[in-house]
Image (cartoon, rainbow, N blue to C red):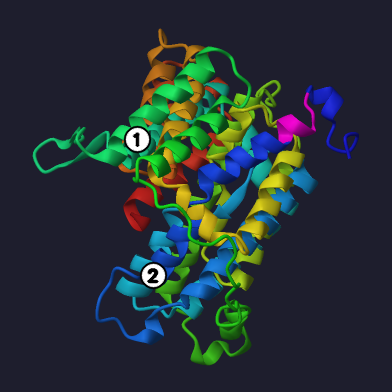
Amino acid sequence: MKKYFQFDELGTNYKQEFIGGLTTFLAMAYILVVNPLQLTLADVENLPDAMRMDHGAVFVATALAAAVGCFFMGIIAKYPIALAPGMGLNSFFAYTVVLTMGIPWQTALSGVLASGVIFAILTLTGIRETIINAIPGELKYAVGAGIGLFITFIGLKNAGLIIADPNTFVALGDFTNGNTLLAVAGLFITVVFMVKGVGGGIFYGMIITAIIGMIAGLIQVPTAVFSSIPSVAPTFGVALEPYLNPVQSDLFTVQFLIVVLTFLFVDFFDTAGTLMAVANQAGFVKENKLPRAGKALFADSLATITGALFGTSTTTSYIESSAGVATGARSGFAAVVTGLLFILALFFYPLLSVVTSAVTAPALIMVGVLMCGSLKNIEWNKLEVAVPAFLTIIMMPLTNSIATGIACGFIFYPITMLLTGNQKRVNPIMYGLFVIFVCYFIFLK
């Protein structure tokens, strides 16, 4: 086991990898609660039952898709990167495709399946890896820092430290709120651990924050440890049904094509951004190339296909994996640990209630601090580099989208390089991406 996951070469051990995998799981366990609520349109009243997915089935599908995705990534690509149904993509699935477009959720699952199959084909042909390796180093650093700001923004929002404001868009939160104070206490504790160089400081900070929350009555103490597992039958295999009877389905429509293209675009660049950011943080990127990128992307594609068959929206690489990397995870064994924990979560679901947003917020904020370290590698004195890098970074948190931030920076990069006579530094693939991103803003947005 140690030899397969290259513990000696990576300078890691079982304890380090286990803590890293557990930290990643705790940082992303919220998806087990949020994804079923999103896909069942739980907050939409007076909706026909036919438009809602089964809550229990989606919960099981979410856990199984995450577990299998983590196993694929850990065993095939050997990266400490966890996967689960992606936030943003699940909202698009539920509120845009099903609720607004009126496409049945069964057909929407077929769209997710189609995007996964197309991704797998693109990966096997080497196209996805070629595109990622063609992205210049300065933009990869910008993507890492941008994602850092993005997840810090999520952490601050989840903590209640910043809130929406009709006049200024955002404002300082309410410090009389108990959960906000709990998050602040958790952040202080985590900072102490990190500054003192305590291994696994982020993980210990989350545990202590949860304990404080239960003592203060802000987090409900679980009343049970075990729970029965719901049936996945209502959603399992449903994605295949429209292909078995295509004449009576919505497969041959412009709307369905747009759905598949959107799933393809957002997942492609969300995954690329996450892989680059986490790999940079862990020190895996060598000479601007990501080792085993093809295997990592193939694992991601297989996870999407598997998730669609179980009955959930697009399964993708999670930026919360950087929390595990920050505590020392360096090998695929950490991802395997995270996958096993997702399976255990099926049985111990009541215990997950203690992992609230106030508990995970300090971890996300601290990970953002660590990921912004890549800013030092950008040549800020060269505007042809600084402008696209800055737009990549700033647009991620401001648009609440990793893919949109990447699109903005990648549009400006060829332009600034051409204007300064540095067109020879631009890989031809970047010009192709320029056209694709312009079309994305014109047609898909």
Packing grade of label 2 (10 A; few <14, some 14-19, many >=20) is: many
| Quarter assignment of residue 411 | top left
| Quarter assignment of residue 153 | top left
| Residue 442 picture location, percent across and down | 33, 52
| Residue 249 picture location, percent across and down | 50, 86
Figure check: 406 above or below 222? above
Side (left or right) of 403 relative to 20: left
Q: Farthest top residue?
A: 381
- Quarter of the rendering occupied by the N terminus: top right
In the rendering, which numbered label is found on residue 4? none
Q: Amino acid at mark 1?
A: Leu
Side (left or right) of 167 relative to 381: left
Q: Which residue is found at the position 34% from the left and 49% from the top?
A: 441
Of discs 1 and 2, which sits in the foreground?
1
Front residue of 337/38: it is 337
Q: Amino acid at mark 2?
A: Val
Q: Which residue is found at the position 72% from the left and 34% from the top?
A: 17
| Residue 129 picture location, percent across and down | 68, 41
> First in sequence: mark 1 or mark 2?
2
- Compute the Cα span from label 1 to label 2: 37 Å
The secondary structure making up most of the magenta span is helix
Figure check: 308 above or below 296? below
- Quarter of the rendering occupied by the C terminus: bottom left
According to the picture, the residue beneath numbered tag 2 turns out to be: 97
Q: Is residue 268 visible?
A: yes
For residue 280: magenta?
no
